[in-house]
Image: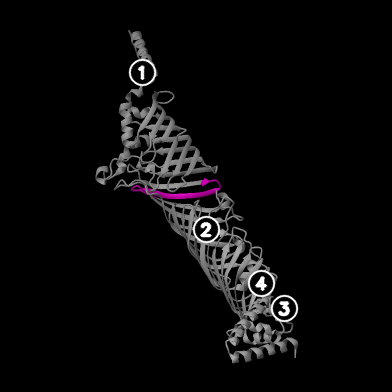
Amino acid sequence: MRRKIMVGLALIIVLVFVAILFLPVLLDLNRYRDRYLPVLEQALHRPVEIQDVRLTLFPQLGVRMQGMTIGDDPAFSPQAFVTIPSVEVEIQWLPLLRRHIQVEHVRLQDPTVHIIRRHDGALNMATVGKDPALHSPEKAGSNPANALKPLFGVFAVERFSMTGGTLQYEDRAKEPFRSYHLEQLELVTDSVQLGQTASLHLKGMVMPNQLPLEMTGRFGPLQSTFDLPMIDLAGSIGRVEGTAQGQVMDGRLELDVQISDLSTDDMPLNIALDKPVFVKDLQAHLMASLISKESPKPFTGVRIDPLTVELQTGEATIHLSGQGTPGRLILSGEAPTLSSEDFPWVLSVQRPFSLEQIRFETVIQGPRVDLVFLKAQAFGGNLEAHGRWDGTPAVPLLSFQGTLTNFSVESMMQALRSSSHRLTGVGELHWIVARAAHSPSGPSKMTGPIRLMIRDGQLVGFDVMQGIEDALQLPDLLEESTGATKFSLIDTNVELEGKGLVIRQLNVEAPDFSMTGVGSLAFDESLNLQGNLAVSRTIGDRIIQRFPMAKVAWHQGRLVLPFTVMGTVQKPLLQLDTQSFGQQVKANVERRIEKVLQGDEQELQQLLQDGADVLKQLFGQ
């Protein structure tokens, strides 16, 4: 009898064991799709598809799903939001005896997540768990986070791991659309359960820049309201390392990010720098409303306020502070001094120069950078400017306008170019220049109007009065040359064009002469200038004594001489148009003879006297 009982018990155990072995085959979870898929879809408010679901008993009790797909919000994309080829969920045996389900491990293999940012800034991930058909807060409920509470059964696990993941981010806020990828993602979290602090380890590759990404940290304790009282992360992208501490309370993320040291050599920039710029002590406070507790408003993005950082370029340090969003960041900066040798680009200058007491404000919006204002001391004067740089095609790439007042012209000229001539005086410069988009023939050059005024200076190395004497071929006409030209004002309006400067108007006021003219100055320093030169009465009388024919050029008490300046900036050649004197004499004589023929006796006597004087001066009798 006892033996029969033992055999019966053994048979029962065998049958139970066999039943357990065949349970995954006999219990087809695919037949229960109509029960669990609606629960997931209602929680996510997204369509969910699963190709195959199997129960597993060995080596661990659990569920294996193949071909899981979560659809996207139709307002964003008809494609899938999440695709997971394989999902494995392991469940502990012992808690089942207490009628409690404890998920030990969730494994995801090769998942792909597609995040889209729309033109209005909304993200497709922000509508997960929200019914798009409900538009009013009354219909949606007072707490949209309640819709996500059924997902706690998925996320409350001892360990969550992912291998081969891909995160795609598509920014459709502005055209052209931009896309970023995180590939080869590996994620491991432990103790993702209510009331516990979870650990995190993430690895991946930022594409297309191929920058390795790694992050470790802790977050929790996880609350039923999705609050995280503590977030502590440390990570790196490429060679850039940083930390972040913060929390999620009432659906609002606040995070303090610190990066102690990085270089532009460590970042994928489209701007070619000749020297690296170092970023020191970057600190940013990030805020984002992840889940709205009062209304179903979409995710509005991340806000940064405040942001502080120090930029080191060469020996100079620029202090930056700002606030805004990644799409529109406002930055203010100041620096005590910035030398031309500190610039990240090599400047084509002959001598180093410095900007001092620098203050500026910029607004960065994607590829567009607006310089709201720039104020500094330069060459002993005051610099004020504003402008814009825009990387968007089909619009000007760069526009820049400003003024530089009360500056030392000599200091500027010494810095910008070497010359055998030296120009001194107090300058005032106004400009409005721009560079258009690239053309098929290549990059375009700066164009626009420029006005330069110089007061109370001199041009050392070129004596205009000596040039007049040489042009008239009248040696010893004037006093001994000083080798310089003193002036009270130079006022010139020019147009910056592709080949150089077009001189629209030139006015020069000096003690012994005044000059007006137009012309051009090419980038190769070739000079072409023409106009009128009016000498003082004293100089005019001397010229007429030696060159009587020049008297016909007398106008309003001054002798006006047509001139041209050719050659180069280094070797200008002044020429006076003496041939025009003969034409003026002919016209003057014809006019006076006409008066004589009309019976003007006084004009006849004056004409004869002038003719006699001219003959005496010509023949020395």
Which structural element holds mark 2? strand
Q: How many numbered marks appear? A: 4
Query: Where is mark 3, residue-wise?
Result: 470
Residue 575 locus on image (x, y percent): 68, 74
Q: Amino acid at mark 4?
A: Val
Which structural element holds mark 4? strand
Q: Dot 1, how many residues are within 10 Å of its Cα: few (below 14), some (14-19), or many (20+)?
A: few
Q: Nearer the viewer, mark 1 or mark 3?
A: 3
Q: Earlier in the sequence, mark 4 or mark 1?
A: 1
Which structural element holds mark 3? helix
Q: Earlier in the sequence, mark 1 or mark 2?
A: 1
Q: Earlier in the sequence, mark 3 or mark 4?
A: 3
Query: Where is mark 1, residue-wise?
Result: 26
Residue 206 locus on image (x, y percent): 51, 42
Which residue is rendered at x = 39% and y = 35% of the image? 157
The residue lying toward the viewer, choosing from 597 and 547, is: 597
Q: Which mark is residue 205?
A: none
Q: CA distance from mark 4 to mark 1?
A: 104 Å
Q: What predominant SS class does the magenta segment belong to?
A: strand
Which structural element holds mark 1? helix
Residue 145 locus on image (x, y percent): 31, 43
Q: CA distance from mark 4 to mark 2?
A: 34 Å
Q: Earlier in the sequence, mark 3 or mark 2?
A: 2
Q: Amino acid at mark 3?
A: Asp
Q: Dot 4, how many residues are within 10 Å of its Cα: few (below 14), some (14-19), or many (20+)?
A: some
Query: Where is mark 4, residue-wise?
Result: 565
Specify the segment rendered in magenta. 236-253
User: Can see residue 97?
Assistant: yes
